[in-house]
Amino acid sequence: MRIMALDVGSRTIGIACSDALLMTAQGIETIRRTSLEKDFQRLQELIDQYEVHEIVVGMPKHMNGTKGERAEKTEEFVAQMKEVIHLPVSFWDERLSTVMAEKQLIAADVSRKKRKEVIDKMAAVVILQGYLDRLQFK
């Protein structure tokens, strides 16, 4: 069983999945959002494929810890997702996850064009790895 992380944006959803031992996070794909029905259908396909038992969703808070419009939209997405995907869902503070992902890609000498293609997936990896690390130290 594995844990899946989602970095939910208005145009894309970055997806990462843990290994079976819940030690490491790997980027899976970036879904280009078209409709909730298609988004949830693709998520369910990936959940089945990777045998996911839990979902972690990045919560985009402001730097001062408050929730803004993007956080509210993420909560709405999760509420709708829970109606069709019946797995436990946790939120994880995603502040600076995209910045960290960008820095990792730059350090790996990934071109600007390629970074744009994979940044959401890599942000999901950062979110999931933080969550997995916390599980290890509980």
Image (spheres, helix red, strand yellow):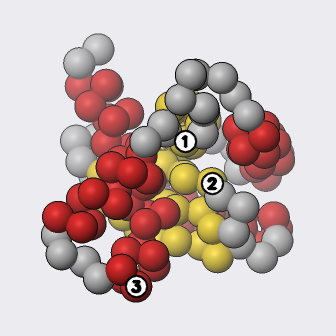
Viewer-proximal residue among 81 and 86 = 81
Viewer-proximal residue among 87 and 89 = 89
Q: Position of residue 65 (x, y in %)?
A: 58, 22
Viewer-proximal residue among 102 and 120 = 102
Task: Give the labeled residue for mark 1.
Answer: 58
The answer to whether 137 is drawn above or below residue 86 in the figure is above
The residue positioned 26% from the left and 66% from the top of the image is 105
Q: Earlier in the sequence, mark 2 or mark 1?
A: 2
> How busy is the neighbourhood of tag 3: few (under 14 within 10 Å), some, or many (20 plus)?
few
- Asked if labels 1 and 2 touch by Cβ distance under 8 angstroms, the answer is yes
On residue 102, the disc is none
Disc 2, SS: strand
Q: Position of residue 76 (x, y in %)?
A: 81, 42
Q: Earlier in the sequence, mark 3 or mark 1?
A: 1
Task: Give the labeled residue for mark 2.
Answer: 8
The answer to whether 130 is drawn above or below residue 2 in the figure is above
Q: Position of residue 50 (x, y in %)?
A: 43, 61
Task: Give the labeled residue for mark 3.
Answer: 113
Res 18 seen here = no
The residue positioned 53% from the left and 29% from the top of the image is 63
Disc 3, SS: helix
Marks 2 and 1, how far apart at CA: 7 Å
The answer to whether 18 is drawn above or below residue 75 in the figure is below
Q: Earlier in the sequence, mark 2 or mark 3?
A: 2
Quarter placement of the C terminus:
top left
Residue type at mark 3: give it: Lys
> How busy is the neighbourhood of tag 1: few (under 14 within 10 Å), some, or many (20 plus)?
many
| Horizontal arrangement in the rendering, residue 104 relative to residue 70 (left or right) | left
